[in-house]
Amino acid sequence: MQLTRERLLQVLEYHPQSGSFTWRIATSPRSRVGSVAGSLHIGTGYRRLMVDGRRYQEHQLVWLAETGQLPRAFLDHINGKRADNKFANLREATKRQNNENVGRRSDNQSGLRGVSRRVNGKWVAQIQSAGVKHHLGYFDTPEAAHAAYTLAATNLFTPYVS
């Protein structure tokens, strides 16, 4: 049976200012009335919780609480922080849009998305869109490389419809 907004709000209290939930009723030995529902999944960075024996990502339940429907496809965290589930930080997205709104890689040494250092001492800019990697060139500064990345992103990435 599909979870409804009514059932969700019967079991959990939604806090729009934080995008989190607390238990209204104890549904298992681990859920205490008034305690914060769910936990952070270390592997993915998303907050998850169980309702009626089914696991949900917290941002999906925020969407259900605010709109009355589970998301049709993907939800994108606008600021890139997977545990920030305030409704204002969520938007429906295609898989492609969701993939395009990722942060910089953890091994990035430039501090700028799409920019890395090469052996020749130059900074290289590259971007990936729709599974295709685009080399944007070599630059003297990381800022110049990032400017090339930013320009390419505005041309290649799919715009969101509000």
Image: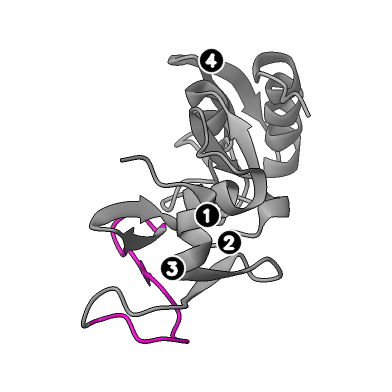
Task: Give the residue type at disc 3.
Answer: Val
Q: Which residue is rendered at x = 71% and y = 70% of the image?
A: 17
Which residue is more in the foreground, 24 or 35?
24
Report the amino acid beneath label 2: Asp
Q: Quadrant of residue 20?
A: bottom right
Question: Mark 3: which secondary structure?
Answer: helix
Q: Which quarter of the image is occupied by the N terminus?
A: top left
Estimate the x, y position of residue 144 in percent, counting from the top left. 75, 35
Q: Is residue 122 above or below residue 154?
A: below
In the picture of the structure, the residue carrying the numbered disc 2 is 84
Which portion, as a residue range, is magenta? 30-46
4 vs 2, front mark = 2
Dot 1 or dot 3, earlier in sequence? 1
Provide the secondary structure element on which disc 2 rests: loop
According to the picture, the residue beneath numbered tag 3 turns out to be 11
Q: Which part of the image, by quadrant, shows the C terminus?
A: top right
Do the numbered discs 2 and 1 sit on residues whose CB atoms are within 8 Å? no
- Distance between the Cα atoms at labels 2 and 3? 21 Å
Labelled pair 2, 3 in contact (Cβ < 8 Å)? no
Give the labeled residue for mark 1. 6
